[in-house]
Amino acid sequence: MTTPPTSHKALLRFVEDFAALATPERVEWCDGSPAERDRLSQLLIDQGTVVRLDPAKRPASFWARSDPRDVARVEARTFICSVKPDDAGPTNNWADPHEMRARLTRLFSGLMRGRTMYVLAFSMGPIGSPIARLGVQLTKSAYVALSMGTMTRVGTAALHALGDDGQFVPRLHSVGAPLAPGTADVACGYHMADYFSHWLSFAERTDPAKLPRIYSVNWFRKDTDGHFLWPGFGENARVLAWIFDRCAGRAAAVPTPIGNIPAAGALELAGLDVDASELATLLEADVAEWRRELAAIEAHYATFGDRLPAALERQLHQLAANLEPST
């Protein structure tokens, strides 16, 4: 639909201001309906962007070919534009927000000329959920408009949830200038130590029985000849089965300095070409190897300074103690 289906003043101003900058030929507000999805799919087929797969074998499925260089974002050209550089943290690139806004304004100027600008109101999470977040993305890509409908709840329902004055995250997407060499991607980000603190805080405000169990897996251990010891792919389900049984209190485990590992016979190995020595290597908690890893973790944690959560420091000290020789 081309007529704005909302009276949300801040949203209308956001769309109008960017349309004035990018100068699209038309503005389309996406409603998220099956009819719209079918229309956009056919448009992409006609453009040669996607190929419809056999509807009997793969109904409502398409093959989209991409360039090997096409990635979600390039780390070296992704910037956190916080007011204070320190708030970007040691794991992100920082840029002055005023300078970046001016730079992107130049890059977006006239960028959608002759194209359709799609307005995508969306909800990350179920509509109405207390932890869902509402946003509005503007893009000239029908492929992105279609993909957003797969990844989020797009359209009329999200607009209704937004109401006349609800908060939303404004997002701009472009295929072209802002992703070209020498230009920048901009992300809404955070200091990684604050991210750690956010997730650790759930232990204090949630029933411990409802918190997820955490398992670490390394699928990529190799033998002395450089060959992978674990076959991977569908065989990973064998490890997942042990994890599920472990959560249910049914699977046996053996304690090690780094945590519990499957006990002998606890993994279902029938039909798997992994001998006893290879399995032993796969499950080995190599203390010397972990001491080297410990030093690397300590160096990484040091980059966060005094913003590193104390809980992570305690966990690291406990790991160091576990790796000390028994007396």
Image (tube, grey):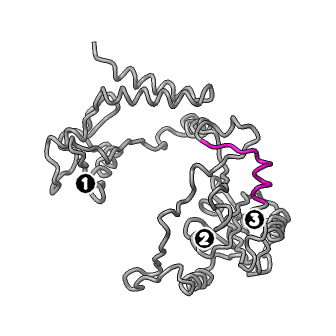
At 49% from the left and 38% from the top, the residue drawn is 208
Q: Tell me the element at label 1.
A: loop
Identity of the amino acid at label 2? Val
Tell me the mark number nearer the camera, choosing from 1 and 3: 3
Residue 205 appears in the figure: no
The residue at which mark 2 appears reads as 144
Q: How many marks?
A: 3
Identity of the amino acid at label 1? Pro
Q: Tell me the element at label 3.
A: helix
Separation of residues labelled 1 and 2 (CA atoms): 35 Å
Q: Is residue 96 magenta?
A: yes
Q: Nearer the viewer, residue 255 or 188?
A: 188
Tell me where residue 29 appears, x and y as whole percent. 73, 76
The image quarter in which residue 74 lies? bottom right
The first of marks 1 and 3 along the sequence is 3
The residue at which mark 3 appears reads as 108
At 23% from the left and 48% from the top, the residue drawn is 227
Relative to 61, 177 lies left or right: right
The residue at which mark 1 appears reads as 231
Separation of residues labelled 1 and 3 (CA atoms): 47 Å
